[in-house]
Image (spheres, helix red, strand yellow):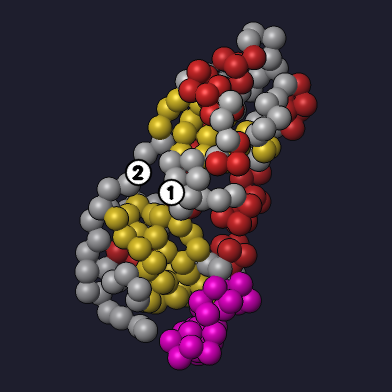
């Protein structure tokens, strides 16, 4: 259902969108009517028609804060009720935006120590996500086998399927060489919708393996 500005969300909103070129604005209206009438789902339409890479994950962008998107998109997203849709025209094209959820306070990444990580590694590994965001050459030099390699440098390629590849409701531990890249990646995962808690391993693999580790940032 299309809706006009009706609210003013104070914190973050979780959104999905379908992006088409400005010349295809009429098509977007037709697609919106199909979704509203139950003839198609938002996710299916996004997957088939959206020009944004998020179309691969049903158009879901995850949680956004004010200042993270262009003004027209932000205005529509933050003034539309949860469960409703709105249109916005930006320099990228025309968007059909679905507001999936809203929250007043954004969760934050929690720093944990190597000792905390060791306790996790000694527990049920199926109950957590373990993500290493270093580069393949660093992984080859030293690694914790329980982790899955997802380099920060290729994050744009693997985040579209991250919510399928990992269980977002589980605690997620992110590691790199020293804790800098992992903090950046952890913040992105939070915005994507990883809501089981996201933890950054302080000191990273350098702290875990010692000074002989081949390190990056």
Q: Is residue 215 above or below residue 176?
A: above
Residue 102, position as x, y percentages in the image: 31, 60
- What is the CA distance from the residue labelled 2 to the residue labelled 1? 8 Å
Dot 1, how many residues are within 10 Å of its Cα: few (below 14), some (14-19), or many (20+)? some
Residue nearest the observer in this picture, 16 or 95? 16
Residue under label 2, please give it.
107
Q: Residue at x 70, y 17 (%)?
A: 214
Magenta segment boundaries in residue numbering:
21-49
Residue 49 drawn above or below residue 134: below
Q: Residue at x 42, y 64 (%)?
A: 15
Quarter location, residue 45: bottom right
Identify the image quadrant of the N terminus.
bottom left
Residue 4 found in image quarter? bottom left
Residue position marked by numbered label 1 in the rendering: 195
Residue 162, given in percent of the width and then of the height, sits at 59, 52
Callout 2 secondary element: loop
Measuring from the top left, give residue 183's x and y in whole percent. Answer: 48, 33
Left or right: 210 as drawn, with respect to 70 = right
Q: Does the magenta segment cover residue 30?
A: yes
* Image coordinates for residue 137, horizontal then vertical, percent: 76, 28
Q: Residues within 10 Å of mark 2 (few under 14, many from 20)?
A: some
In the rendered image, the quadrant that contains the C terminus is top right
């Amino acid at each position: 259902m299309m809706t006009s500005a009706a609210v003013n969300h104070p914190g973050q909103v979780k959104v999905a969108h379908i992006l088409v070129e400005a010349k295809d604005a009429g098509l977007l209206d037709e697609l919106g009517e199909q979704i509203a009438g139950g003839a198609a789902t938002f996710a299916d339409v996004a997957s088939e028609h959206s020009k944004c890479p998020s179309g691969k994950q049903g158009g879901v962008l995850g949680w956004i804060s004010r200042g993270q998107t262009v003004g027209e998109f932000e205005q529509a997203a933050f003034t539309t009720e949860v469960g409703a849709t709105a249109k916005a025209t930006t320099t990228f094209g025309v968007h059909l935006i679905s507001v999936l959820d809203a929250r007043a306070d954004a969760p934050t990444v929690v720093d944990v120590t190597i000792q905390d990580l060791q306790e996790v590694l000694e527990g049920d590994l199926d109950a957590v996500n373990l993500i290493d965001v270093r580069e393949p050459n660093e992984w080859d030099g030293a690694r914790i086998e329980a982790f899955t390699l997802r380099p920060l440098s290729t994050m744009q390629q693997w985040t579209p399927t991250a919510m399928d590849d990992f269980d977002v409701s589980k605690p997620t531990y992110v590691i790199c060489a020293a804790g800098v890249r992992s903090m950046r990646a952890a913040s992105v995962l939070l915005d994507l919708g990883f809501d089981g808690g996201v933890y950054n391993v302080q000191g990273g693999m350098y702290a875990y393996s010692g000074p002989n580790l081949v390190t990056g940032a």
